[in-house]
Image (cartoon, rainbow, N blue to C red):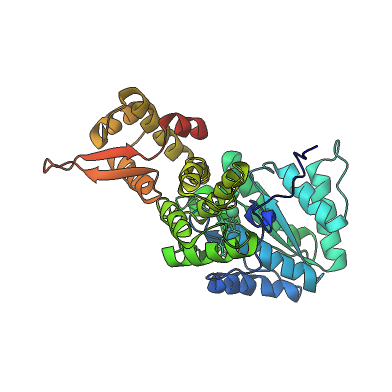
Amino acid sequence: MRKYLYSDETLFRNHDLFEIGYVPEVFNYREAQLEDIAFALKPGLHGSRPLNITLRGLPGTGKTTAVRLIYSEIEETTRRLVPVYVNCQTERTKFAIFAKIYGKLHGHQPPPTGTPVRKLIYDIGRTLSERNTVLSVCLDDANYLLVNKTLNEILYTLLRLYEEFPNANAGVILPMSSMEVKLPQELDSCVLSVLQLKEVYFSPYTEEEISDILKYRARLGLFPGVLSDSLFDLIIEQTMRCGDLRVGLDLVKQSVMTAERAGRMAVEPEDVLSAYEVSKHVHLSASIRALTKDEKSLLYEIADMATDTGSFLTSGAVYEVASEKMRLSYTGFYEKIRKFDQMRLVELSYLNNGGRTREIALRYDPEKVKEVCE
Ligand SMILES: Nc1ncnc2c1ncn2[C@@H]1O[C@H](COP(=O)(O)OP(=O)(O)OP(=O)(O)O)[C@@H](O)[C@H]1O
Ligand SMILES: [Mg+2]
């Protein structure tokens, strides 16, 4: 009988290369950023406190990958510095985060129930102090912890461990794709004074860089002849519509899967175009994730209006509706709209009537935008 699940007809040489969590071995164009991160961590190798840094940059610019690469180098080379990677989209409470640190330090999880956070912190502090090891904690997408001042509390505890436990040194890495979050406003001054945060900026990749990275990945991951040069160019063209590398990676994967499912040996233009309808949502989700709460509400309102009217929206009309629902100055409103434009969530254009009114066109299906914003 024909095999369904384990058919070996595949166009992928290595499917893993297109999975979300894959850490690439070759990571070009981020040399300066890797060096900055390494510089910040270096004191930790000698038992001192690492510098605290925030990594800023739009979605898909390599922040998470950079940390993963540096952390795996640390794991391979030293036990003096213990790196703990935390994904704040899934670990959102003080307990969850300290349990993660505890687990990494002690090699086993704390008892799931009945352990107070205080006890975890006490054990962590004592272990660091006794073993003379240093902690580096990466709170990835730390903006998720701004609710209820969770981030403030965690940083306060971590960075002041040394006061109670001699030589218990810890440093943090805070990658954030939200460019608007202003930590000095979100954190208390007693935290800011120990934090002394330095910023490492991850600029957006240029078209050439995106093309080069994707070409390399496709060469390693696909069999020769599966993706022709001209279709590769089409993929780059589609990717640049939102400028997000992650969309490009997903486009390659989705197009090849579509060709595979149709029993073809090579990708065709329709495969790329239909894949784009799926892959562009990768960008939508990542971008919306990077918005602050207010920005999300505003985008929701725009999507809502776009559903109702179906036609174009003017900046004035949107401001009128939005300012009824949320507190918003016109300047604040306009800054947010411009940001949506830069993130390629909307397209902003002047109306040809000589005035200052702008047209706002959503680049995505309004229903989909509303769904993701919620
Ligand atoms: N320079 C690069 N070379 C090869 N692959 C890269 C490079 N930069 C990013 N990538 C790939 O792009 C994808 C997105 O990168 P990553 O997750 O590190 O971005 P990010 O800045 O953390 O994004 P977000 O803010 O959305 O979390 C990953 O699959 C990663 O493998
Ligand atoms: Mg990331």
In this view, the residue farthest toward the bottom is: 46
Residue drawn at the location 64% of the way across and 60% of the way down: 221
The spot of residue 160 in percent (x, y) is 70, 58
User: Residue 331: x and y, percent?
Assistant: 29, 44
Against 255, residue 44 (above or below) is: below
Residue 100: x %, y % from top left: 77, 50
In the rendered structure, the answer to whether residue 300 lies left or right of residue 10 reads left
Image height of 250 relative to 203, above or below: above
Decide if residue 326 is in sight here. Answer: no
Residue at the far top in the pictured view? 308
Residue 56 image offset from top left, x and y in percent: 51, 59
Task: Report the quarter where the N terminus lies.
Answer: top right
Instruction: Count the numbered circles shown.
Output: 0
**Residue nearest the viewer, comparing 75 with 179:** 75
Residue 315, quarter of the rendered image = top left
Q: Which residue extends farthest left?
A: 354
Ligand 1 sits in quadrant: bottom right
In the image, 21 versus 135, the foreground residue is 21
- The residue under the point 67% across, 62% down is 68
- Image-quadrant location for residue 90: top right
Say which of 227 and 71 sits in front. Answer: 227
Towards the viewer: 116 or 341: 341
